[in-house]
Image: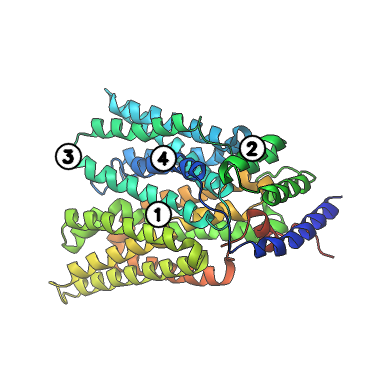
Amino acid sequence: MERESRGQLNSSLLAEETNSAESLKGGSSATAVLVFSTFIAVCGSYVFGATVNLGLSEGQYSVFASIMTIGAMLGALMSGKVADLVGRRGAMGISEAFCLTGWLAIAFSQAAWLLDIGRLFGGCGVGLLSYVVPVYIAEITPKNLRGGFATVHQFMVTFGSAMTYFVGTVVSWRILALIGAIPCLIQLLGLFLIPESPRWLAKVGKENECEDALQRLRGVNADISQEATEIEDYIEALQQLPEGSILELFQRIYARSLIIAVGLMLLQQFGGSNAIAFYASSIFEKAGFSATVGTVVMAVVQIPMTVLGVLLMDKLGRRPLLMASASGTFFGCLLVGVSFSLQDIQWWKDVTPVLVFIGLVIYNGSFGLGLGGIPWLIMSEIFPINMKGSAGSLVSLVNWFSSWIITYIFNFLMDWYSAGTFFIFASIGGLTVIFVAKMVPETKGRTLEEIQVIINPLTAKR
């Protein structure tokens, strides 16, 4: 019976793919409800960036900073299950309750332990947000707009991080924490005004609510019949399959999705992303360049590059942007590595600090172009909805755990061999280009159901 249902699902989606491809050029437009729903969702992304950046201005991965990462791992571990049980809106509400509690605990703390508790709660919220925001946006957005809308998540993470840094230079940390609570409140209130994910509603058997939500998102005059039918047919076939657990992710039919999602997260983190962000000040100081100038320029450059990624996502596609982004991180790290090597042998001592600065700016800008946000977008696209909760928890946990590892060992690596550290990061950037070229499919312009035909056919071949 399971093989038969998988085969029926695959056949029906292949037949629908032709009809969907014919309507691709026209696509769907961005309605006011869709834009507003995305805005409310990415308020959580802003909180993500602000929470990560708080307390890292000194460039030291302190206990205060590491507690946030531990909390994020806990949040990531329960993110998929929470989003499946209470819905995407419910999960965002729970995450913001964690974040709001964390900000207020920090703002009104009278003892060090309360600061740590606040940081832990904020981390739990961020771990949930890092999964549910891109998933919600991917599930509410039409295929021709999904890439650009989903990439707004990374833009708001970047913007939240940059604004926290800039505002933190002129206000106290208590005021900064209170400011951080504002987008939490905006999202909590906004969640009452936006529709739930139609795909989640269909998954839990609320077909009428699914169609109502889809109609609100696409516009009152839009014809949603084809999209609603595709969603409902796909969910109906999936309901004949068991609800996915983390152990079931390791079946052969999900192998490619798991390799792609976990691989991209590992390459993103071990390519140096959070390590460079957290330790930017100390890297500039070691190179002999102004830490203040360097970190400000890095923050400023990443914002327009992330905007460029948003604009190009649904024009060029995920693969070209990922490969261009990874190529840029490769070149940036290579330049920094060469600069530290020249410093070690006392060559071009007046030039090498500037070369380190240029290399890190190239790295940060290139990372914002695609590697920062696209892995989260692809993670939200490539798993079937019956496995999305378990897969999201596992993949988010891998991301945060690898982030903790690389940020923890970064100082040891720099003490061992500064140039070698960046040569390692550069080699991982090059490996990312190869990995994307060989493993990652192009998902631009396809519905989430069509993507499953390509990457997880859900059929047992004999």
Which residue is under mark 3? 170
Q: Which of labels 1 and 2 is toward the front? A: 2
Residue 272 in sight from this viewpoint: no
N-terminal of the pair, mark 2 or mark 3, is 3
Q: Secondary structure beneath disc 3?
A: loop
What residue is pinned by disc 4? 43
Name the kind of residue labelled 4 in the image: Cys
User: What's the residue type where badge 3 is placed?
Assistant: Val
* Picture coordinates of residue 92, whole percent (x, y): 50, 36
Q: Secondary structure at mark 2?
A: helix
What is the C-alpha distance between the residues marked 3 and 1?
31 Å
- The residue drawn where x is 22% and y is 70% is 355
Please tell me which of labels 3 and 4 falls first in the chain.
Answer: 4
Proximity of marks 2 and 3: CB atoms separated by less than 8 Å: no
Quadrant occupied by the C terminus: bottom right
Name the N-terminal-most of marks 3 and 1.
Answer: 3
Q: Which residue lies under the disc numbered 1?
A: 406
| Marks 3 and 4 close (CB-CB < 8 Å) | no
Q: Dot 3: within a 10 Å radius of its alpha carbon, few (fewer than 14), some, or many (20 or more) residues?
A: few
Residue 291, label in figure = none
Q: Which label is found at residue 212?
A: 2
Q: Is residue 133 left or right of residue 207?
A: left
**Circle 4 residues within 10 Å: few <14, some 14–19, many ≥20:** many
Q: Which of the marked residues, 1 or 4, is nearer the chain's N terminus?
A: 4
Residue mark closest to the camera, 2 vs 3: 2
Which secondary structure, mark 4? helix
Q: Is residue 318 above or below residue 338?
A: above
Q: Are marks 1 and 2 in contact (CB under 8 Å)?
A: no
Work out which residue is located at the far left of the displayed protein and give it: 350
Gap in angstroms between the C-alphas marked 1 and 4: 28 Å
Q: Earlier in the sequence, mark 4 or mark 2?
A: 4
